[in-house]
Every structure is written in C-alpha cells, then in structure tokens.
Image: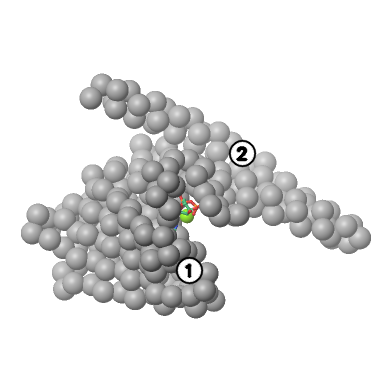
Amino acid sequence: SEEVLIRSEKLSAIGQLAAGVAHEIRNPLTALKGFTQLLSARYPEHPHYFTIMSNEIDRITLIVNEFMTLAKPHFTQFHDVPLVPILSSVLSILETQAILLNVELKVCLDHTAPTVFGNADQLKQVFLNIIKNAIEAMPHGGEVQLSVATNDEGNVLIRIKDGGSGIPEELIKKIGEPFVTTKEKGTGLGIMISTRIIEAHKGTLKLSSVVNVGTVVEIMLPIQEAS
Ligand code: ADP
Ligand code: MG
C-alpha cells in the first residue's frame, strides 16, 4: 500500500543519512580513542576516568558501526554465495565466547549445500547478530541449535534455537525497533539491521519466543539455482 511505500522510503532516506553521519564520526572517534590511551599512560593516578572514557568511546564506535550498515544495501554487491562456509566462519568467530559462557553450539545440516544470491559480509553480520543474541540469552550456559534445511519451494531455512531467557510478550512486538534492548551493553540495533539485510535478500526473518523456555529465529532465503 501507499503508506507502507512512503514509510520504507522514509526509512531508507533516514538510513542513508544515518550511515553518512556514522561514517563522518568514525575518524574523530579513532583519534579520541588514541589520545585517551596516551593520556591514561600519562596520568596513572586517574585510571578510572580513562577507563570510563575508553569504554564510552567503544560504545559510540559500536553504535556507529552498526548504523553504517543501514545504507549499505544500495552499494553492496550481490553474488552467488554458498551459505555453509558463511555459517562456518561465523561459528568460528563465536566459538571462544560460547566456550567461556558454557554454551554448546550444535549444528545440523541437511545434505544439500545451498547457494544464495547475496552479499557474504552482510549475511555474516546477520548470523553473527542472531547467534550472539542466542548465546547472550543463556548466561548460565546451555545449547544453541543451528539447522539448515532446504525445501521444495526453492528456499533455504536457517533456524537458530536457544534455551535461554526468552522474550516477554509485551516486549516482542517492539523487538526490531531501533534501540530496543534489555542489555546493559546492548545497542538494540542487531535485529533491525538483520531484518533489513534479509529483506534486501528477498527473504524473511521471524522470531518466536517463550519466557524461560527459549527463542527460535527462522530465516528463510531463496536458493540460487546452479547455472
Ligand atoms: P541487542 O542485542 O544489542 O540488545 P538486538 O536487536 O540484537 O539488540 O536485540 C534486541 C533485544 O531483543 C535484546 O536486548 C533482547 O532483549 C531481545 N532478544 C533478542 N534475541 C534474543 C534471544 N535469542 N533470547 C532472548 N532475548 C533476545
Ligand atoms: Mg544483539
């Protein structure tokens, strides 16, 4: 409908503006971080101030980096990319964090190795966001199940299931809006950005959750037939 169209145009204009601003903020932040470190060596009697400054600079950097990806779909190139290597690289990035938190990452692949038409970096970012959320939902450890299966309609379904805290019903409607987070160090941008990336790949991202039982994220992407 018209309203939806206008809304998504607005979002993409805002996204481009945000990414432009984000890009401009990055260089001064690098300088600030560097000189903060320099000063902290110079004033060892006030380590606490510099730790706070440094942490806050890191936080701005994190938010800015996440925002950068908002406008990128306009510039990113799509190719035929095999999905399994993308998932493997994400799993190896998250392995250490998982071990530290006593979380086991279990993978189940069907026998096909699907290729999708897309951008590998963006897809990596999506799986990184979603699997990280799953790990973070289980502070006392547990299991994250990742499964990849293809169906007869020509789609691949990637399912990420955790046995974590779950999301209360009143919150789940808001998840995916910018800055909605329940984490002290969260940005509340992960799901919004992931959803946008998956939609740019003509796929869908669905989230379902039961408090104290866990959360399932299902990502569906069209398979690119070998040519
Ligand atoms: P962030 O992780 O920075 O908070 P996200 O957009 O990735 O931002 O997630 C938003 C919020 O959704 C989280 O703060 C959390 O409350 C909830 N959430 C997302 N994934 C899960 C999950 N697997 N289990 C429980 N809560 C989740
Ligand atoms: Mg997140």
Q: Is residue 150 left or right of residue 5?
A: left
Quarter location, residue 70:
top left
Residue in the picture at 48% in, 75% down: 141
Q: Amino acid at mark 2?
A: Ile
Of mark 2 and mark 1, the one earlier in the sequence is 2
Q: Categorize mark 2 by other alpha carbons within 10 Å: few (<14), some (14-19), many (20+).
A: some
> At which x and y percent is residue 80?
23, 54
Residue 175 visible here: no
Q: Amino acid at mark 1?
A: Met
Query: Is disc 1 placed on a helix, strand or loop?
Result: loop
Query: Is disc 2 placed on a helix, strand or loop?
Result: helix
> At which x and y percent is residue 52?
75, 53
Q: Mark number for residue 25?
A: 2
Mark 2 C-beta to ligand 1 under 8 Å: no
Residue in the picture at 34% in, 29% down: 8
Q: Mark number for residue 151?
A: none
Q: Which residue is mark 1?
A: 138
> At which x and y percent is residue 97?
51, 71
> At which x and y percent is residue 147?
27, 68
Residue in the picture at 69% in, 50% down: 56
Q: Categorize mark 1 by other alpha carbons within 10 Å: few (<14), some (14-19), many (20+).
A: many
Mark 1 C-beta to ligand 1 under 8 Å: no
